[in-house]
Amino acid sequence: MTPSQITAYMSDCTLCPRQCHANRTAGQTGFCGQTSEITVARAALHFWEEPCISGSCGSGTVFFFGCGLRCSFCQNHTIATGKAEKSITPERLAEIFLELEDRQAANINLVTAGHFIPQICRAIRLSRAKGLSIPVVYNTGSYEEVSSLRLLEGLVDIWLPDLKYYSEELSGAYSHAPDYFPKATAAIAEMFRQAGPPKFDERTGMMKSGVIVRHLVLPGQVKDSKKILRYLHSTYRNDIYVSILNQYTPMEQTAQIPGLNRRITDEEYDRVLDFAEKIGIENGFIQEGCTAEESFIPPFSTGVT
């Protein structure tokens, strides 16, 4: 991706389903809240992903400012809606990737990066030209355009998408995106097309390529969770991994939102797990213990230089 190509995408931005058409090169911002300048909130080793992603050394996680989804219960809302004091270039981002690899990161983990896909394509190519050899993980809420994801073909090894909602009422209420399910499932289908069934390092057990779909169980939404799991299993069988999360954490901004102002119960989570087993999901991850704590939310800065 050349600088001129990046400018073309940023001058009339349609990277995500919001289709804002913002001229981000002129400083305009669409729904994501970002201009064409790359803004990074945190770049560090992260140890709380799935075991085949974090391993013992940690995932080299890069959190980007802005988001095209902005869920009302987002644990990272400070960066989803925040601004960085400084921006970085694709060249500097490529250096960050290499620095994380030097720190023994298991992979490069790009978190909520969809609004910077053209710049990220350039950064990945630059870093690989300088020797980056670890897998690249694309970590997303899945409200993505298939045409944008195709720009990443051959550059991303592991896809780590969410599938948050089946119900358009829920996605409209909590993420202002009633079209979330059709958009997200089309995006996941494209991710699977690119990655194929999972592959692992036989020696370490770390994932080399493939798709892990995450689903966060929301309070009072066991039926919606079951519909999502049934869809995933009937569509992909055991050619993907499914990660069922119990870590929903009520945040300050959800205190007055009915249904989102409490954690999920053990009984709710167990019902979802029992259903997953009943329909035959074999490749998956579950969470045990008290994971709904703010200690699972990493500290964010106002930018990375």
Image (tube, rainbow, N blue to C red):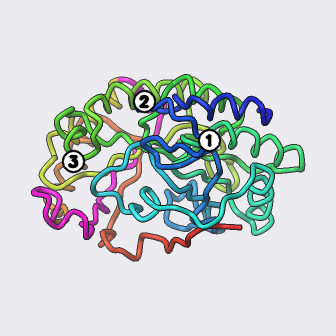
**As shown in the figure, which amino acid type bears the numbered disc 3?**
Val
Label 1 packing within 10 angstroms: few (<14), some (14-19), many (20+): few
Region in magenta:
235-261
Q: Secondary structure at mark 3?
A: helix
Look at mark 3 in the image and give the residue it sits on: 272
Q: Amino acid at mark 2?
A: Pro
Report crowding for label 2: few under 14, some 14 to 19, many 20 or more residues within 10 A (C-alpha): some
Which quadrant, please, contains the N terminus? top right
| Residue bearing mark 1 | 26
Residue at image coords 75%, 44%? 124
Say which mark, if any, is on residue 17: 2
Q: Is residue 34 above or below residue 176?
A: below
Point 41% across, 32% down: residue: 18
Going 78% across and 52% down the picture, which residue do you hit?
Answer: 94
Q: Is residue 42 above or below residue 67?
A: below
Residue 193 in percent (x, y) is at: 56, 23
In front: 10, or 79? 10
Sequence-first disc among 3 and 1: 1
> The C terminus lies in which quarter of the figure?
bottom right
The location of residue 292, given as percent across then percent down, is 30, 69
Point out the tag, 2 or 1, that comes first from the N-terminus: 2
**In-front residue for pair 171/108:** 171
The residue nearer to you, when weighing 33 against 45, is 33
Residue drawn 57% across the image and 44% down it: 138
Q: CA distance from mark 3 to mark 1?
A: 47 Å
